[in-house]
Image: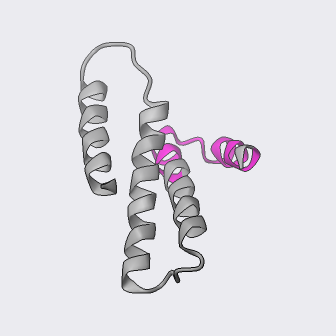
Amino acid sequence: MAVTFFLLWFIFCAIEYGIAVPAGLFFPGLLIGAALGQFVGLFMFQIGIITEAKMIGSINVYAAIGGVSVLTGYTRLSFCLAVLFMETT
């Protein structure tokens, strides 16, 4: 499910970035990173790194970190987004 969501938003974001219309890339980048982070968290649960007791909290943390890291990667505002992430959590 997370992979399908990631691929769908990634394709939409690539099309949006390639056409010449004024549109935002902030929220789609956050969604793409959150889906990728959730996928990593679920994968780590499947291979046994994350236990059952910590599953829900860990997957949410991976999703939040993934969203901020992808957003930081293409906006190159690492310190600003790190402070924004700290304030929102």
15 vs 34, nearest the viewer: 34
- Percent across and percent down for residue 37 are 45, 59
Could you tell me which quadrant the N terminus lies in?
bottom left
Whether 14 is drawn above or below 19: the answer is: below
Which residue is the extreme one toward the bottom? 48
In this rendering, position of residue 21 left or right of residue 33: left
Q: Residue at x 29, y 56 (%)?
A: 3
Which residue is the extreme one toward the front? 53
55 vs 83, nearest the viewer: 55
- Give the mark count: 0
As for residue 78 lying within the magenta part, the answer is yes
Q: Residue at x 67, y 49 (%)?
A: 82
Q: Which contiguous range is marked in magenta?
A: 69-87
Which residue is the extreme one toward the right? 87
Asked where in the image residue 42 lies, by quadrant, the reply is bottom left
Whether 7 is drawn above or below 23: the answer is: below
- Percent across and percent down for residue 87 are 76, 44
Q: Residue at x 34, y 55 (%)?
A: 2
Q: Residue at x 31, y 47 (%)?
A: 5
The way the protein has been coloured in the rendering is one colour
In this rendering, position of residue 10 left or right of residue 48: left
Asked where in the image residue 25 lies, by quadrant, the reply is top left
As for residue 43 lying within the magenta part, the answer is no
Magenta stretch: dominant secondary structure:
helix
- Percent across and percent down for residue 79 are 68, 47
Whether 75 is drawn above or below 57: the answer is: above
